[in-house]
Amino acid sequence: MPLSTDETGPQWRRRTAREDVLSWFGWATGLAVVGGCFFLISEKTIWEFVWSAPREAADLGARMVPPDWSYSSQLWRPLWDTFNIATLGTGLALVISVPVAFCAARNTTPSTAIARPLALFVIASSRSINSLIWALLLVVIVGPGVFAGVLAIALRSIGFCGKLLYEAIEEIDVPPVEAVTATGASSGQVLTYGVVPQVMTAFAGISVFRWDINIRESTILGLVGAGGIGLQLSASINNLDWSRVAVILLAILGTVIVSEWLSAKVRGALS
Amino acid sequence: MTDHVSDGLVEPSQRTWAPPRLIPNARLRWFIALAIGLYLAAAFGTLDINWERVAEGWPRAQRFFSGFVPPDFLSRQGAILDGLLESLWMTAAATALGVLLSIPIAIGGARNASPLPIYMACRAVMALSRTFHEVLIAIFFVKLFGFGPFAGMATLTLATVGFYAKLLAEDIEAIDRSQAEAIRSTGASWLQWLDYAIRPQVRPRAIGLAVYRLDINFRESAIIGIVGAGGIGATLNTAFDRYEFDTAAAILLIIIVIVMAAEYASGAIRRRVQ
Amino acid sequence: MPTLSINDLTKRYATGDLAIDQVSLVIPEGQVMALIGPSGAGKSTLIRCVNRLVEPTSGDVLLGDQNITKLGARKLRRARRHIGMIFQEYALVERLTVMENVLSGRLGYVGFWASWLRRFPKQDISDAFTLLDRVGLADMVDKRADELSGGQRQRVGIARALIQNPDLLLVDEPTASLDPKTSRQIMRLITELCRERNLTAVVNIHDVPLAKLFAERVVGLQAGQIVFDGSPEGLSPDVLTRIYGEEDWLATAETGNADMPESEPGVVEADRSL
């Protein structure tokens, strides 16, 4: 207790002396760890490059202006592809993640011995591999192009959507489900009348949320050959064609802003 | 016993009922269905799937993955360890720096704590640092700062600001107003108000978010290495470039294990704090 | 101790709602005044205009010879520390301890660093102990505020207001979320303390019997205007109808009154506060 009494009356401090020491020790350790990390990073850094960064940035900026506007007419197709990668990938992921989520949720899984661990494994492995790495692998397997991108986005999103959805399913209200069961409904009917209505909003929210993330992700898949505007970007960077890079960045900026605006609208309508 | 309440009382066909539709306007409903159909047709039409190439996929995948087994942890042991450590440094430093930078931006970007011009400026910073994917930012930082973990740290710091400041600002905006009002009514200054009314209310979530971001930053550090920003991703990229698929498999396995462990740990910590 | 005078005070919200319409009141030193009226009559707005948690549109608030409505930010904070406030939902900072909550009443007097490090002057600490003794919470000092019951929380709220050593006490529905017995205890405590310290107090209260029991003077507010000002004895059914609207004011719960929850404003208000 931080309370004590001395000759002048009762004393109060926020922490006991012991807690004080522990708290200072904690902060000091944290600081030392972070400081050590900075030191180790700086060991591996060529500081001349870092100091010249502002000049480099100014130089890059100068090369980007004016943007090569004529190039923008060639960007519609890659943008369309980017949009498709995100949208179809999200759609595919949703179709797969719904049964996975129902298998993974404790209250709806058909069997806790086989289906649940299996579903959780699918979710965990999908989540722990980034879509860029998925794309890297898929380009080798199905060949470069939009299809690899769609699959990469879908494979990464299954885990994301599956996890959020099964958490939503586990958080539903129990009494309505009991009420539907009490009418003598079959387990399929319990699902459609008791569970599905309760998770519909969550499901819609999750889809839009992931779609918004996927738009951002699909802009970079082209870097490893999986279609979309990233292809043009990496080509232009490799050719040091900075005025084109500027146009591409602006296009990406526009796409991301539009998608964010759209998803905010939809989410606003949902809640 | 009959199965219906109204058996023998009312002709069953007299009244009908159909469930209300999500979109009540029939014309709009058809229009949306048509639009979705058209979009899907157009999207699949332009997908350009080379089915021959996809059909080859299976044998290719087999060959590809046979290169993966058995994963080789040992021959590039040193490089893997180096990459891992680098990733960890980047993650820790970027999270700490990012959170530190985020706190003033979050306070500035909370409408109930800051005047409008500052609010707009801080919100703009958040939006800008969230627009581009980490990998794109990493490409540019590698150009500016040179290859290596510094560029990676800078990238992750920026990404952390976009994420952390936004969520923290939303959290500050969602605090209990009456507690804030009570502290204000005692004559507290703005800083005291932050300390007594805001900090206690947002602290648990702020810690939770920081731990969560630490977890995300480690994942991202594995990716941005592919474009030269240091860390385990760089090691992975080198392995792919040298066609050392067994080493790549080992690295992927390590990443997966660490990511899962980190996620489990961060989940446990967040549950305890909140 | 100074007198509180309110002159022609008007508040129109940005939404266009006229909450207070040219209210003038003089509350002499040491008087405990109850402010009654239906929900939305402007009671909360009126007392928040006094310490400018809500910025009045026009009119003046004078505490002694100081015109509070004309003060700049720094001077306003100085004025606020002499005005204690007690809130409806207690408005304790839930994650701070009882002691920290009470000491937060001193924020207007101590510098930022002292408050940041929780190093309050000895006198403040000993005052806090005295007050916690007085409100009967001496052994709760290091409990977190969210561990307390409603009545205990309101006692902490009272101690927080009194440690400011205020000239004026603003009390906003102190009993709205308390059971009948605790309500009486809290109201008794507040009025006792006001008498002990010769404090001027404005008490918003929806519970008419409680107001009659504890206040020396009652002011009725209806749609932002004063419709009654007098001693509690003057609250005849006629007057209550003028304040709250038509209702059988002599009926008690036993004689039956099916629509009571709809027309008894106190009940409605209490529900909203949940």
Image (cartoon, coloured by chain):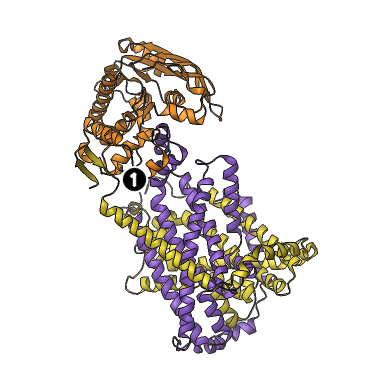
Chain colours: A yellow, B purple, C orange
Residue sitting nearer the eye, B95 or C165: C165
Q: In the rendered view, tell whether residue A9 sits above or below residue A111.
A: above
Report x, y in % for residue B39: 65, 63
Q: Which residue is denoted by mark 1 in the rendering? A: C95
Residue B256 lies left or right of residue A220; in this view the side is left
Q: How many marks?
A: 1
Q: Is residue A10 left or right of residue B272?
A: left
Q: Quadrant of residue C35?
A: top left
Return the chain for callout 1: C
Residue at the image position 60 percent from the left and 42 percent from the top: B117
Identity of the residue drawn at 40% across and 57% down: A195
Amino acid type, residue under disc 1 in the picture? Arg
Q: Residues within 10 Å of mark 1 (few under 14, many from 20)?
A: many
Return the x and y of residue C239 as percentages of the image width and height.
37, 12
Task: Residue lying at the far front in this picture: please name it.
Answer: A7
Q: Is residue A84 visible?
A: no
Which residue is nearer to you in this view: B67 or A63? A63
Q: Position of residue A247 (x, y in %)?
A: 73, 63
Query: Which residue occupies 61% across, 62% down?
Result: B132
- Please provide percent x and percent y for residue C6: 46, 17
Q: Camera-side residue: B149 or C25? A: B149
Whether residue C126 appears in this view of the structure is: yes
In this rendering, position of residue B182 left or right of residue A210? left
Query: What residue is drawn where x is 60% and y is 47%?
Result: B121
Q: Secondary structure at mark 1?
A: loop
